[in-house]
Amino acid sequence: MKKLDIDARGKINLTLDVLFKRLDGYHEVEMIMQTIALKDIISIELLSRRDIVLNTNCKKLPQDESNLAYQAAELMMKEYELDAGVSIDIHKNIPLAAGLAGGSSDAAAVIIGINELFELKIPKDELMTLGERIGADVPFCILGKTAFARGIGEQLTPLKSLSGLSILLVKPPYCISTKEVYNRLDVKNIKIRPDTKAMIDYIEHQDIDKIASGLCNVLEEVTIRLYPELGDIKKRMLEKGALGSVMSGSGPSVFGIFENIRDAKRAADDFAGTDNWIFVTKTE
Ligand SMILES: C[C@@](CO)(OP(=O)(O)O)[C@H](O)COP(=O)(O)OP(=O)(O)OC[C@H]1O[C@@H](n2ccc(N)nc2=O)[C@H](O)[C@@H]1O
Ligand SMILES: Nc1ncnc2c1ncn2[C@@H]1O[C@H](COP(=O)(O)OP(=O)(O)O)[C@@H](O)[C@H]1O
């Protein structure tokens, strides 16, 4: 039977601004999103019967219909009336509920994989529109690289690619619900907002120092209120040479941009021995 391995890469948010709460309960955002090399591997195999079989190396991950990869397969099968099925194996490396879009990225990989495996030839923009039904971050995970996101995150404009930046990720040993963080945000009293326009300009000029100093996420205030130690992680990253540091998405992962991979690894050593998950990676 035909089989494919697809990389499901994580993301970080270089900026995240929330404009207002919509009537549907979602928040209108402006974000600059960036793919990182940290990835899950999704293996998809064609099944002759109309079924979805899911396996994973991660015990904490749901293996039923609540798994976003399962939902993506179900959506593709329904939408394109596929009369065969898939077996999906998720090799998880991206920590769960970390603000790194691990689940969204798995879903995106399944959508891309089924499109290839069944030779559907559906254009990327149609796959992205479909992906939105699974989650707000899925369209970006299908597009990848560097992009400006609006709406709930689904209206995407590709930016000049910011690949090769050295990144240190530090995630404390707990998960955070995206829904809870958005719910706790007091949109009318946001203290510090990113200058998104300026950031787009810095990216256009590939000005790393300015990009690092422009990192800003309005959800950080909410999550740091719940977990003040995230502020200490940021501080420590900056003390250890990060050009800039901020929380990704709804958290709790914090990332730092470093001059080079050696500096990022040196700072990572400083976090060793704590109960945090630590990972050095690059932007893609
Ligand atoms: C915060 C961000 C930033 O990239 O990422 P993560 O921290 O999840 O990685 C995203 O906006 C998250 O995207 P995603 O995780 O796909 O969100 P969804 O599953 O669609 O929504 C989860 C919940 O978050 C809230 N939500 C999400 C997106 C948005 N623009 N406004 C919202 O209010 C809603 O309450 C929704 O029920
Ligand atoms: N394939 C998947 N990988 C990761 N999480 C998943 C997956 N399917 C469903 N989930 C659930 O989605 C939630 C958020 O997942 P994730 O995408 O990792 O985080 P975030 O939205 O913070 O980036 C988790 O609580 C997890 O149980």
Image (cartoon, grey):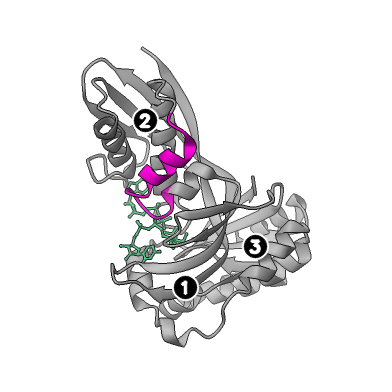
Circle on res. 256? 3
Circle on res. 18? 1
Report how far apart the C-alphas of labels 1 and 3 lie in the structure.
22 Å
Q: Which is nearer the eye, 253 or 5?
A: 5
56 left or right of 15 in image: left
Three-letter residue code for mark 1: Val
User: Where's the C terminus, which quadrant?
Assistant: top right
Report how far apart the C-alphas of labels 3 and 2 lie in the structure.
31 Å
Residue 63 is drawn in which quadrant?
A: top left
Three-letter residue code for mark 3: Gly
Q: Where's residue 108, x and y in %?
A: 42, 41
Three-letter residue code for mark 2: Asp
Dot 1 surroundings within 10 Å: few (below 14), some, or many (20 or more)? many
User: Where's the N terminus, which quadrant?
Assistant: top left
Q: Is residue 131 magenta?
A: yes
Disc with the residue nearer the chain's start (1 vs 3): 1
Report how far apart the C-alphas of labels 1 and 2 lie in the structure.
35 Å
Would you say the residues marked 1 and 2 are in contact, meaning their CB atoms lie under 8 Å apart? no
Q: Where's residue 189, x and y in %?
A: 45, 87
* Magenta-drawn segment: 122-138
Image: 263 above or below 84: below
- Please state which of the two labelled residues, at mark 1 or mark 2, is closer to the viewer: 1
Number of numbered discs visible in the structure rendering: 3
Q: Where's residue 140, x and y in %?
A: 49, 49
